[in-house]
Image (spheres, rainbow, N blue to C red):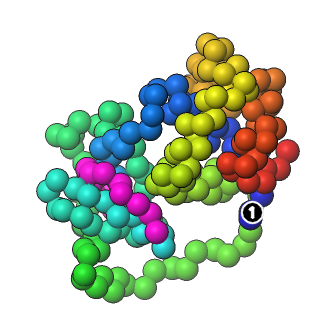
Amino acid sequence: MKRINRSCLLPVLGLTAVLWAGSPAPAVAQQVIQLKDQTVIRGQVVEMTNNTYRIKTPSLGEVKIPADQVMSIVNESVAPPAGAPVPAAPRAPAIREGHRPTPAPAARPPATGRTDDLGSQQKEVNTRVQSMMMDGGFLNKVTGLGDSSEMQDILGDPEVMNAIQSGDYEYLMKNEKMQRLMDSQDIQDLLGDVEP
């Protein structure tokens, strides 16, 4: 398993805390999926397998979207209103169940050099978080974290919760309670190896 830089893990822990504090049990919510070509799909992400999201939509039925075409996935409660203008762009074809995708023009291959910069690591973590959020077992483990004393310390500290919600990672990196949570066996079991 790849090792992830500790500073990139903070958003995962923040999401975990917000998820646990926000609801007694994880619920599957309607989501807004924005594709790289600016297409917006509203629906419920059912699963992610083989780098493909399976999404159930009210208007299109069930569709499959390659993960590399997805720019963001947010809960509908924090997404722009349905009538908000979206920049016009050609629509990328979604992969419908039972249909083969139309081959796209050859694209420039991604760079293969490994980078240690935080931006790249953050993208990797965000992708990993999206995959984890589609896994029911992961959500059950996240819910179970709420019983740990380390998570209770964080949930009970308004300053830490404000830092999580505002994305103040510098504060969180220095916070003793967050450090204890990051070092806990529960987090290691949940997320794997983490570099200091």
Residue shown at the point (52%, 25%) measured from the top left: 21
Closest to the observer, 83 or 196: 196
Q: Residue at x 36, y 57 (%)?
A: 46
Q: Quadrant of residue 111?
A: bottom right
If the image is split into quadrants, where does the N terminus sit? Answer: bottom right
Q: Is residue 126 above or below residue 178?
A: below
Q: Is residue 173 visible?
A: no
Q: Residue furthest right?
A: 196
Task: Give left or right: position of 40 versus 48.
Answer: left
Q: Residue furthest left?
A: 59
**Residue at 77% from the left image edge and 58% from the top image edge:** 3
Q: Please name the predominant secondary structure of the magenta segment in the image.
A: strand
Whether residue 57 is visible: yes
Quadrant housing the C terminus: top right
The amino acid beneath tag 1 is Lys
**Count of numbered marks:** 1
Going 73% across and 41% down the picture, which residue do you hit?
186
Q: Quadrant of residue 92?
A: bottom left
Q: Which residues are magenta?
A: 37-49
* Residue indicated by mark 1: 2
Image location of residue 155, percent across then percent down: 62, 20
Residue 9, placed above or below residue 103: above
Secondary structure beneath label 1:
loop
Counting from the top left corner in percent of width and height, residue 179 is at 80, 31
Residue 48 falls within the magenta-colored stretch = yes
**Is 1 inside the magenta-drawn segment?**
no
185 relative position to 81: left or right: right
* Left or right: 175 as drawn, with respect to 66: right
Taking 138 as reference, is 36 above or below it? below
Q: Give the x, y percent position of residue 68.
A: 46, 67
Query: Measured from the top left, where is residue 99 in percent x and y?
Result: 24, 82
